[in-house]
Amino acid sequence: MDNHNVSHEKQDAASFQPTKWDMCALCQKNTKEKLQCPANARQTNQGSTYVTLAKNLTKFGECGALSPGILTRLDDGDGVEETFMKKKASFHMSCRLKYNTTKLKRKLAQIRDLIKLDKLWSLLN
Ligand SMILES: [Zn+2]
């Protein structure tokens, strides 16, 4: 008898955890994977990683493909991109790749197909 369908997790304000910026900003987990900090990269375009990631995260959020609260957690009021730069956010490479432009395009294509299906469906009804 397995009757544990009811989730005990509560996604309310009480369980809201502020971002720990010394950890991976995306997963907030301590793993063996090395953290990468774009702010410490010796490149002239160090901000571009943050810009792209913030933009993609926002889009993923609009698609409903992010866990609720993550964008709120990553935005201290000036926008995700600004917050990343201010806090010198670090990420696991694997976490960052989950939100890259290729993955975003795939997600958007899925949604586009769903909308098409939805329109077809409404024609039948
Ligand atoms: Zn991570």
Image (cartoon, helix red, strand yellow):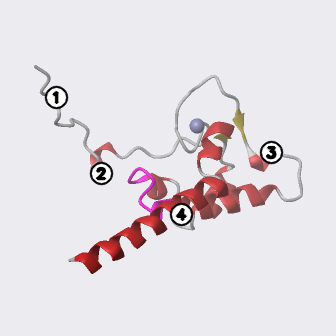
Q: Are marks 3 and 2 in contact (CB under 8 Å)?
A: no
Cα–Cα gap, marks 4 and 1: 35 Å
Q: In the rendering, at what x and y percent does residue 38 appear?
A: 76, 48
Q: Are marks 4 and 1 in contact (CB under 8 Å)?
A: no
Ligand 1: does it lie within 8 Å of the C-beta at label 3?
Answer: no
Position of 57 compared to 17: left or right? Answer: right
Q: Name the residue rendered at 48%, 60% in the picture.
A: 110
Ligand 1: does it lie within 8 Å of the C-beta at label 2?
Answer: no
Cα–Cα gap, marks 1 and 2: 24 Å
Occupied quadrant, residue 32: top right
Neighbour tally class for label 4: few under 14, some 14-19, many 20 plus, Cα within 10 Å: few
The question of residue 61 being in magenta is answered with yes
Q: Are marks 1 and 3 in contact (CB under 8 Å)?
A: no
Q: Name the residue rendered at 67%, 43% in the picture.
A: 90
Of labels 1 and 2, earlier in sequence is 1
Q: What kind of element bears circle 4?
A: helix
Residue highlighted by disc 4: 109
Residue highlighted by disc 2: 13
Q: Which residues are magenta?
A: 58-69
Residue highlighted by disc 3: 40
